[in-house]
Amino acid sequence: MKLIMRADDLGFSEGVNCGIYKAIKDGVITSVGMMTNMEATQHGYNLIKDCDIALGLHANICAGKPLSQVELIPSLVQENGDFCASKDIRQRKEDTIKTMGIGTHHMTTESMHPRTSKLRTCHYIRGFSSLQSLLSISPT
């Protein structure tokens, strides 16, 4: 059996990026999830791009600004355009994400090697009914 240790939040801040980079160099981390909407994303990618790891997407809907047009996701953003904090969304009386009227059967994620673009890991996950409108996935 092979144990894969994953670090999420690459791109959250330069401090987080440096911690992830150190863990990779120390041999602890072999898989990284990158938050593509954060200001330190390019810094994080530049640190790990030559490392022998699996690089994947960390889907983020509760920190920073969305990459989508805010008009398309009004229930997820504050007036200033930043995502609502996850604690604020959890405290709502109505699940605004589920009531967007669209269901999703599954979600597939892939992790690519940053230098060679070869597929490293692939996940098929069923039961993510509220993700379709967030990720702009077409129904199948």
Image (cartoon, helix red, strand yellow):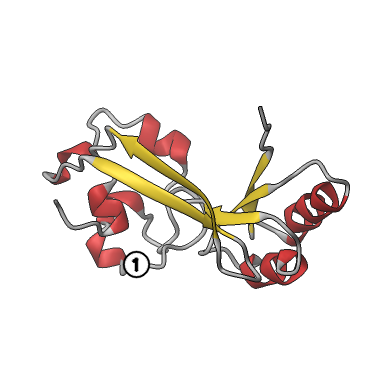
| Of residues 69 and 93, the one drawn nearer to the viewer in this rendering | 69
Up/down of 62 relative to 34, above or below: above
Residue lying furthest front: 1
Q: Is mark 1 on a helix, strand or loop?
A: loop
Outermost residue toward the right in this view: 26
Task: Where is residue 113? Give x, y as percent.
Answer: 61, 62
Location of residue 10 in the rendering, given as x and y in whole percent from the top left corner: 65, 55
Q: Can residue 3 be seen in this view?
A: yes
- Which residue is located at x 80 percent, y 51 percent? 24
What amino acid type is highlighted by mark number 1?
A: Ser
Q: Is residue 99 above or below residue 13?
A: above
Query: Would you say residue 34 is visible in this rendering?
Result: no
Q: Is residue 61 left or right of residue 114?
A: left
| Residue under the point 77% across and 67% down | 47
Q: Is residue 110 left or right of residue 32?
A: left
- Which residue lies at the image location 29% right of the left edge and 34% below the top edge? 126
Please tell me which residue is depicted at 14% across the width and 46% down the height of the picture.
Answer: 102
Residue underneath mark 1: 68
Q: In which quarter of the image is the N terminus?
A: top right
Percent coordinates x, y for residue 56 in the rendering: 54, 55
**Residue farthest toward the left in the current orientation of the protein:** 101
Horizontal and vertical percent for residue 69?
31, 69
Question: Viewer-proximal residue, 61 or 3?
Answer: 3
